[in-house]
Image (tube, helix red, strand yellow):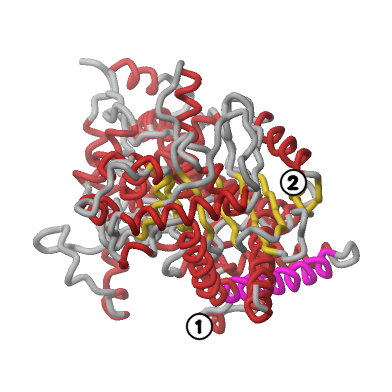
Amino acid sequence: FPPVRAAAMSKKADLLDVLSEVKTRVQDKLGIVDFPMPQFILIGKQSVGKSRLIETLAGETFNFISGTLGSRRPTVLEFRHVDNADPSRWFVRDPQSNQWMEHPIAQVMKLVGQRHEELGDSVSRSPIYVRIESSGCVDMQIVDLPGFRDFALNAERQKLGDEIDELDMEFMRDSRNVILCVEQAGDAATMASLARCRNLDPKFERTVLIRNKLDKYYKDLTPDNVNKWVDGFGDLPENLVRFALTLPFWQDGEAPPKPFRELTKDMDEEDRRQMQRRGLSEKYMSTIGFSNFASFMETKIESMFGEAIGPVLANLKELKESAESEEQSLSVELQDTDPKRIVSTVRDCGVSFAMALTHVMEGVLELKPVMNLEDELREFHDHHRALGSNHFSTLPSGDFVGLGEYIDYLRDEMQLATFDVEVNGGAQFRRLMSEVEIFLRFSEIAVETKKKDVIQARGVSMTTLTWRDVVVKLLSNEAHLPLQRRLAYVGERIRWFFERQKEAILNFMLTLEGTPAANMFSPLFPRHARLIQQNEMIKHLVFQTYDMACQRQLKQFLDLFDNILTSTFSNPWVFLKGATTESEGDVEDLKDDVLPSFEDTKMRIPKEIESRCSTEGQLCKWLPGIPPEAN
């Protein structure tokens, strides 16, 4: 090559080396798959000439030994043009160290074969990386995919073929990959691999068709049909980049008649000479022969990788910023989790977590996780079913056959406004309060009071036993325990709700950083949230303490209402009262309801006291009317 062109090729090779190294480190070492690095992928049926095309691009023959089952994983081939590399140098990237290791070509073939054979009857997406430095190759990187299988002898081979098809299609779906589709230079309408490309790339924006074995069709081409043949007789779209060529070949078991590079050159010249003789139009001549294909690949590579530099640098910048932020976060975590400060750090995290609960209950937009009432009730029942809980009523009444019927009742008959709305925090708590209020409305004596129960309750006593005492006994026996179990349901529902807010609280604290709303809350929230998220010990201690607080509040709630129930059923007359206010018209119409004034409240209190006394007085008139003895 001339000095200027040689220098340009050297710089291009250096650029490819840098981009290739970046891609390998980012994708393989860091595990980041979605990285904007373009690449060529080679597809086609078995024995269509894919391997020979790779050999031609490399400038020498070789044969990857992949066993009787053929290749079962991608092979990433990196070709680097090095003027003084004679003989060529071969490298394989070690999968453990990610370093290029130089080997003799025979050893490279063996290593590649072992990587295929270790898969057995399975397929892997993990590629083999091979690098060739030669004076006769083109600077490029190409991914050789396993060939499509036309047929299978048995079910196992069919399964293997299906897995290979899915592997190839996965690479073809990636919009960054330019597809090199190798087909035999036959009827364009029967090209199966090209049809697969059409399904994933309908406009053929990233598909290049290589029609191999052009020499077999020399005799069929005439000045009348040669242009139509190259054009696919209308079956190939105008915008599809296509090439027709003949790759070097010779009889199996025999040595090549000439050095491989000379043979490639001869085939290329023969293709162009034969097509010119048959009167092929000049506009199609640039699509004939390997040399035109190689020139196209060099230009395409420069274009692709030139366009990729901007996105690659942008992604590397994002990765750098992310790594620096992670480093700073880990530094803070290391400092805060120092054994001398760990107790104080855990307490600070717990305080921030508790403070954040208040804000979550006040309502935060776009906060996750969320759930609707049906999912909430089903998850609550599944939770206690797994625990084997039986200390509270799971349904408000025996009239409900199961949870599904209760859910339908809440949705269809009660028509809770937020039943199907996915919410959390305060909105979810408000909905929970509506549900448990409906649940408690079913609190009634569900059994019929029988004559023998009344006689048994009357009994006999050394002192005077009145009907008032009998009513108290009946109420205590039939209503106290059911109401106690319903209140236990309410308590368990509230506790379960707060325990399920932990993830929402943590997400709220984490998502504050860098948002306009961050200035409205404690600046310690994001810092403490990262500590809780990243340090399992701190997370366990904070969540455990939070759950213990919920359990403690449940116990206090139940103790309080147990005492109230005990007091109520020991002397129910004291708790009798009429309606607080008198309503006019429809009792469900609350549009005009407003808080009473101070003067109205002063006038209402004496009326309520009188109302309570009148209720008790009315009962006192009724009870003496019950005959003490049977007539």
Q: In which quadrant of the rendered view does residue 305 lie?
A: bottom right
Q: Is residue 526 above or below residue 625?
A: below
Residue on which disc 2 sits? 95
Residue positioned 55% across, 64% down in the render: 37
Residue positioned 17% across, 72% down in the render: 592
Residue at the front extreme of this rendering? 277
Q: Secondary structure at mark 1?
A: helix
Q: Amino acid at mark 1?
A: Pro
Q: Please state if 216 lies on the left or on the right of 326 as rendered.
A: left
The mark lying in front, picked from 2 and 1, is 2
Q: Residues within 10 Å of mark 2 (few under 14, many from 20)?
A: few
Q: Is residue 441 above or below residue 593?
A: above
Query: Which image quarter is the N terminus in?
Result: bottom right
Q: Nearer the viewer, residue 619 or 275?
A: 275
Query: Quick check: can you spot residue 564?
Result: no
Residue positioned 80% across, 44% down in the render: 104
Residue on which disc 1 sits? 516
Please state the extent of the stretch shown in magenta in the rendering.
313-337
Q: Nearer the viewer, residue 84 or 272?
A: 272
Q: Position of residue 170 (x, y in %)?
A: 46, 46
Residue at the right extreme of this rendering? 340
Q: Amino acid at mark 2?
A: Pro
Task: Identify the mark nearer the N-term, 2 or 1.
Answer: 2
Which is the main secondary structure of the residues drawn in magenta? Answer: helix
Q: Is residue 418 above or below residue 246?
A: below
Q: Position of residue 90 (x, y in %)?
A: 75, 50
Q: Nearer the viewer, residue 365 or 322?
A: 322
